[in-house]
Image: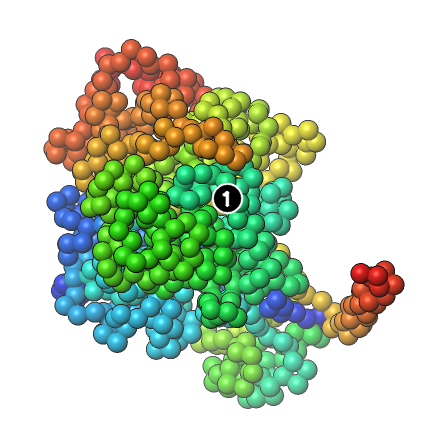
Amino acid sequence: MSKKLFFNPAHCTGCRACEVACSFKKEKVFSPELSRIRVVKLDEDGVDIPTGCEHCEGAPCILICPVRAIRRKAETGAVVVDQNACIGCKQCMVVCPFGAVHFDSARKAVFKCDLCDGDPECVKWCFTGGVTFGETAELPARKRHRTARRHVKAQASQGKGRAGA
Amino acid sequence: MTFKYGGYAGSLLFADLTKGTVKKIPLEKEWCTLYLGGRGRDARLLFEKQDPSVGPLDPEAHVCISPGPLTGLLGPTTGRVNVAGRSPLTTIYGNSNAGTNWGPELKFAGYDGVVVTGRSQKPVYLHIHDSDVQLLDAGRLWGEGVFETTARILEEHGPETKVAAVGPAAEHGVLFGSVIFDFWDAAARTGLGTVLASKNLKAVSVRGTGAISVADPDGYYEAAREGWQAILDDAGFRTGEHSALGTSICVNWGNAQGWLPTRNFKESHFEGADKISGEEFRDLYSTKEAPIPAGRACFSCPNRCKRFGRIDEGKYAGTKGNIEFEGVSAFGSKCGVDDLAAVFHAYMLANDYGMDCISCGNTIAFYMELAEKKLLDTEGLELRFGNADAMVEMVHRIANREGRLGELGSQGSERAAKAIGKGSEAFLNTIKGMETIACDPRASKAFGFGYAVSSRGSDHLRAHPVFEMLKLSEGVGEELFGSKEAVDLRKYGGKVRLLVWHENIAAVTDSLGSCRFMHASYYAEYPVPELVNKYAKRKKDPAKVRSIKYHRWFEAATGIPMTYEKLLEAGDRVINLERALNIQWGLKKEQDTLPPRFLKEPIPRGPAKGELFDPEKFQDMLKEYYAIRGWDWESGLPLEEHLRQLDMADVAACLGKRGLLATSRTPRSEDGAGVGSEKSSPPASSLDDCEERAGRNGGTPARRP
């Protein structure tokens, strides 16, 4: 079973602690530009949307990399970059639909989320559920049950208890 | 790390708009240890660079926009940025602080601050993209509102650019013009936006892609994590109410405690509070609700107190933005208006025009009372308390300086009262020229006393002593401030020491670039959680009590050795420096007072009925305060010895040359206040130190044998 990061805009407060936590874990400095996770802040409309690598099954970055510097790690299912192998052609940046691959100009290589080997730092600094880490296999079941519970609520409000009101 | 200390970027940008030049200048290392950064360093820079004869709106005036050494780092509430200069509204020291993403962005671009002076011949804006810094033409932006200006700059320079902008009110010369960061985050008090506009500077936009390093990464991570956890552990935070309602939680809370200013401070209890409350805003306009109460947060902050909302229908459709309690009270309870849509609209208008909602709302409320007393020609407007339409109209008139009311109002209520005459001064709520915030000083004594001594004129954020409102156990008050009364908002005991401690911590957090809410609202910082636990009925294991230890946090970030006591001393230093600036700019001791209404007129009804600020007690408190701060009682000037003890000999020398230094304490008979107050200030570092302090404040001559 593979786990992935869930980005939940409704829960995100836009504080960007995840960004600096990520850059600190990976590079020992504070820099959103070196973060693997980014919060898109649409201040004009008061909306904050966390974004990052979705570790796609048919990852276009893996397919396009001409030197096979990007591969999937069997243990975590994460799509990871070997910076030593990367030639800096940036084609992965072009094909990634999420803007989740970034270029490190000091190392002349791309970088991206590697799920911190299955223990993502960003999640440890998010206390509102804006970014969580979970099993995708359980996801549809959880959603089925959440929706089902709404039916119970709806019945309760339309049923006998409220009929007289 | 190219700079000696971590946390800092190591340089400032110095823009001379007369010459059209922008230079990178190195940060003064000594100022980092003495004045930390942000508010402290800004004051030091103004003291150094700005001749006291330079007027607030002269081209030679300086404005500093500075984050602190912790801004941009991971840790609770590190998004703050300070704006400082000489205020056009008060003509003394002006500064304002905002929670932003702009401050961190400037640090990532490689700067600890931007200093602006001179006057450009035509409108410009300063755009910073890392080391690429340019003054660009702002002709097409001039006259545009803050929102439009910000949106256009984002279009021009990319969506991740951060923008600080001034609005048309500032351009028109309204004396309380604000600087608005990233659409909604205001540094509005004292009118420094007007100073920027007088320089023909429309905006400062920044995109930073660099990194900030700290001196001790592991130590820093630990300190930040503990600080973050301390907030999450806090009982007040855990209720989730503040996060759910934002600062507007204070509408109903303040109303219940009897300190919600109502109808120009005639009363302190508003019958319409429910209708303009945080709960009402959440239910009607908040866009960010489900599935959990998630407001919007400043950079790296767990608190998320910004409430974003939008009006979709009715005559104010299209209004949107972040609201805070102060604006809601200024246009709501102070004007007697209980129509939340109108309040929200007026508030967002003030932001878009770029002016301080507090000064603006208070001035309108002041007009309403004058109209009620028939002291004002209302120019056809029905300016009565509760008239939402007249209030909204006045916002437009003030911002555009339309008509006599608009013209006078744009100069603030104190100047307006002078022009109107007829005894209208009696209805003012200004101190040192600035309008009072949304907490009645008669009902809450530490707040009230704090307004009188605040270095930027009437304001709560110099101290923010919410401590007295929280109903903490008496033991905490007694141990920290020497009196059980410290935890009772109506009483006077211990309130001076309470205020001094809060002022010192506030000066520190403003200088470090972190937020007031950690020490006032949550009291997550050392030693409060420890003390609260000590006096709690159900105690936690003391080893498990977490707190924000600013000294450790600062030390790990910068590498500058720091203790709790030294940090409080830095706060005292900042406040003394601001006093020095104010004295140079003509502040008189007589201005350290409360408006007559609060000293004479008891609150007529509500939970705080009968309360006033006892004038005699006020004088005693002031004496005690001066003694602790090291100011001469007769003249109000800083004492040379105290400044020297604070490593401010250079400042003392400069004041001495200008004849603005007290060299020995004026002899006086009753000296108990000073001794008692400082003796057990928390916690005394050593016995020797304690005795020395007691001696210093006990009325002995400044020059000891």
Q: What is the residue that sits farthest to the top in this orientation? A: B669
Residue A62 appearing in the image:
yes
Identify which residue is drawn at 14% across, 68% down.
B121
Q: Quick one: label 1, few (<14), some, or many (20+) residues within 10 Å?
A: many
Q: A50 and B61: which one is in front? A: B61
Q: Mark 1 falls within which chain?
A: B
Q: B561 and B288: which one is in front? A: B288
**Position of B490 compared to B381: left or right?**
right
**Position of B302 compared to B555: left or right?**
right
- What amino acid is at disc 1? Phe
| Residue B489, horizontal then vertical, whole percent | 50, 31
| Residue A11, horizontal then vertical, whole percent | 62, 63
Tell me: residue B233, above or below residue B298: above
Tell me: residue B503, above or below residue B116: above
**Position of B412 compared to B617: left or right?**
left
Identify which residue is drawn at 42% across, 47% down.
B334
| Residue B7, horizontal then vertical, whole percent | 40, 52
Identify which residue is drawn at 46% across, 36% down.
B465
Identify the coloring: rainbow
Quarter occupied by residue B607: top right
Q: Quadrant of the N terminus of chain B?
A: bottom left
Identify which residue is drawn at 19% across, 50% down.
B56
Q: Which residue is mark 1?
A: B270
| Residue A80, horizontal then vertical, whole percent | 60, 75
Q: Quadrant of the C terminus of chain B?
A: top left
Residue A138 appearing in the image:
no
Helix, strand or loop under label 1? loop
Quarter occupied by residue B59: bottom left
Q: B525 and A108: which one is in front? A: B525
